Structures are given as structure tokens and as C-alpha cells.
Amino acid sequence: MSVEIQSPGVGAEAEAPQTKRRTESTFSRVAKYTSYKLAMLFLTVVIAVYLTILIANMGGYVDEIVRGQIREFVGQMLRIDPNYQQMDPEEKNEFFQTQVERAEKRYGLDQPFVLRSFRYLWNAVTLDFGYATLMASDTGSRQVKLIIQDRLAPTLLLIATSNLILFFGSIGLALSLSRGYGSFWDRFVLAMSPTSSAPSWFYGIFFILIFAAILRWFPFGGMIDSPPPRTQWAYILNVGKHLVLPVGAIITSAMFVSIYNWRTFFLIYSSEDYVEMAKAKGLSANDVQNRYILRPTLPTIITSFGLLVITLWTGSILTEAVFHWPGLGQTTLTAIGLYDTPVIVGLTIIYAYLLAITVFLLDFIYALVDPRVKIGSGR
């Protein structure tokens, strides 16, 4: 009986090309998937932005509204012009039409809406927000990017504070409730969950009535007192005082239903067979929670957190309006009321790009937290 002994070097040499081919195959698969995903997301963003341009302009109908506003404004200005009043009727009409045409050309209304819509789309894709029609930044500039920059910090402060507290607080409380199914607090959250049907601005009105008008504990609205405090710490405390009511309204509006949803989600995973097996092995409650409940739910938690980051940039339109909070939400409402298309499109561009980037990154994050997911695999 003979035994054939293979040299260790021969096996290594035979295995090296296979490992190299597997690496190249994985790299090729990831590269193809990344290219395809980026192309589809870019196409989605382009379509979404162009639809926003069409809707914001009402298919070109806003041009007629702006033309009417221009004629009304030019007429009001000429009524107080003494030189215009001394002209003959024909000269008045000709001069009036000349001024109107000049103003329409300045707003780009001398070109068809279809041509301007594609120019708007190109500027949007290249992140050239252009100039607002009527709105202006705090410094008086009509550049859309400066208008958004001025309103961005207040929105991030308000929405980030409230949503981050709501998100992590809801998960923590939901985990606690999932361990005490049927307890008093579990039934209490279940009974209070319908209160989340009311929006945050609804609670904001009641909070202003109770805590600002009656008790006078907090200010009615705004972000800072007028005149503002002189010292830095006094300024921070003053902003925090103005922040309490809007943050409380947002958290109160979504707190119970968020806790209920996460609690139900964790209960579903808690009833799995592998969780019961872990409990039978004598593992502690914290080990079971961290290893067998939280770990499988990480993809869903990461998705919710990723979509939460997107909402930080959009703000809460009506809530900011109720509290006179100088953020992007109130800016959006003002832009819609003034038919200021460049500002509306600029805000939509930011949301569309951030949403596309978040969706793109989530696929790779899934592969890191869930070993069952492979990038570019059809299985």
C-alpha cells in the first residue's frame, strides 16, 4: 500500500490562482453593481427634479401669474413717476410695455417654458441653484444657496434634537416594554398610541396656549429673544429655552406610536426559536437582547436611522410656521406662497441627492452588519 504525499508548496500554488479569480470575480461583481446602482439613482434624481420643476411651475401657468405681478408692479411704480404722467396716452402705453418686457426678460419670461425647464434641470443636476425670484437671505442676497444656508442651522438644531431623542428613546423604551409584555406600561403605551394621529403642529398650538400664554414659562416662538443676549452662555440658554416647546411638540406627536411600533417589532423577533433556545441555555436577558434580538434587527434600525437623517434637512413645515422658527420648513412654506420656483427646486435637489446617497450607502452597510447579504449578488 503506497501513500502519496503532496508537498505543501504544490497545494498553495494550485490554490493561489483560484483565490485570485475569486477576488477578481468579487471585485467585478461589486464594480458592476455599484455602476448600475449609481446610474439608476442618478436617473431617479433627474426625473424627480424635473417633475418638481414642472409641478412648481404648474406646467408654465406660474409664468402667467408672474407676468400679472410684473404688470401690476410696473403700473404702481409708473403712477408715482411725474415724467410718466406728463406723457401722451400712446407714449404712456408704449413706455409701459417697454418696461414690462424689460422686466419679463430679466425674469427669463421671454423664452418658452420648455426651454427654461431644461435649463433649470441642468442647473439643478450641476448644483447651480441660481437666484431666487422674490426671496432673499439675511444678508440681502438672492442667491438660493445663501438662502438655504441661512435657514439650515436652525432646522438642523430643531429637527435633529427632537428626532434623535425620539429615535433612540423609542428604541430603548420599546426594548424594555418587549421584555415586560402585558405589563401596566405596555398597556399604557398601547392605549396612548392613537394620540399620535395628531400632527406636531397641533400639539404645538396647545403647548403655546398652556406653557406660553397661561403659565408664561416659555416664549411664544422664534429662536432667540430680541435683543439677543450678549454673552455666549446666555445666548445658548436662550436658544434652549425657545427650543423646548417645538421639540416637545414633535416628540409628543410621534412618541407613543413609535414606541408601539418598535415594541411590536422586537416582540416578533423575541418569539423566534433561536431566542427561546438562547434562554434555555441560561443566557442573561442582556445577552439575549444584544446578540439575538438587536443584531438581527440592525438592518431595519439602520434603515430607519438613515431615513431619519434625510428628514433633518427638510424640517417640519407647519411646526416651524406655528413657532415662527426660522428654518427650512418655514422657508419652503414661504417659497410656495410666493411661487419662488428656484428656492423650491433648490430644496428638492438637496432632499433628492441626500436620499439617493443614503439609499446607496445602506446597501453596503447591510453587507457589513448582515453576513447573509452580498453586494451585487442576485441571491
Image (cartoon, rainbow, N blue to C red):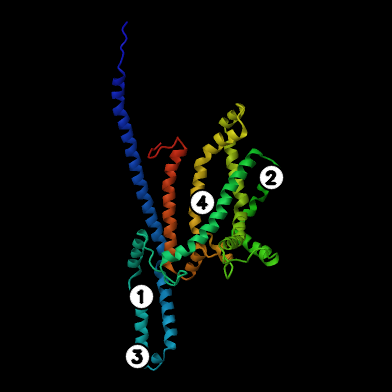
The nearer-to-camera label among 3 and 1 is 1
Q: Amino acid at mark 2?
A: Trp
Badge 4, how many Cα within 10 Å: few under 14, some, many 20+?
Answer: some
Q: Secondary structure at mark 4?
A: helix
Q: Earlier in the sequence, mark 2 or mark 1?
A: 1
Residue 308: image tag:
4
Residue hosting label 1: 106
Q: Earlier in the sequence, mark 2 or mark 4?
A: 2
Whether residue 271 appears in this view of the structure is no
**Could you give the CA–CA distance between mark 3 and mark 1, rounded to whole angstroms?**
23 Å
Q: Is residue 273 above or below residue 356?
A: above
**Could you give the CA–CA distance between mark 4 and mark 3, rounded to whole angstroms?**
60 Å
Query: In the displayed structure, does residue 332 sit left or right of residue 257?
Result: left
Residue 268 image point, x, y percent: 58, 38
Residue ID at (47%, 37%): 370
Residue ID at (48%, 53%): 310
Q: Secondary structure at mark 3?
A: helix
Residue hosting label 3: 91
Residue hosting label 2: 185
The nearer-to-camera label among 3 and 2 is 2
Q: Amino acid at mark 3?
A: Glu
Q: Earlier in the sequence, mark 4 or mark 3?
A: 3
Q: Earlier in the sequence, mark 3 or mark 2?
A: 3
Mark 4 touches mark 3? (CB < 8 Å): no
Badge 1, how many Cα within 10 Å: few under 14, some, many 20+?
Answer: few
**Could you give the CA–CA distance between mark 4 and mark 1, rounded to whole angstroms?**
40 Å
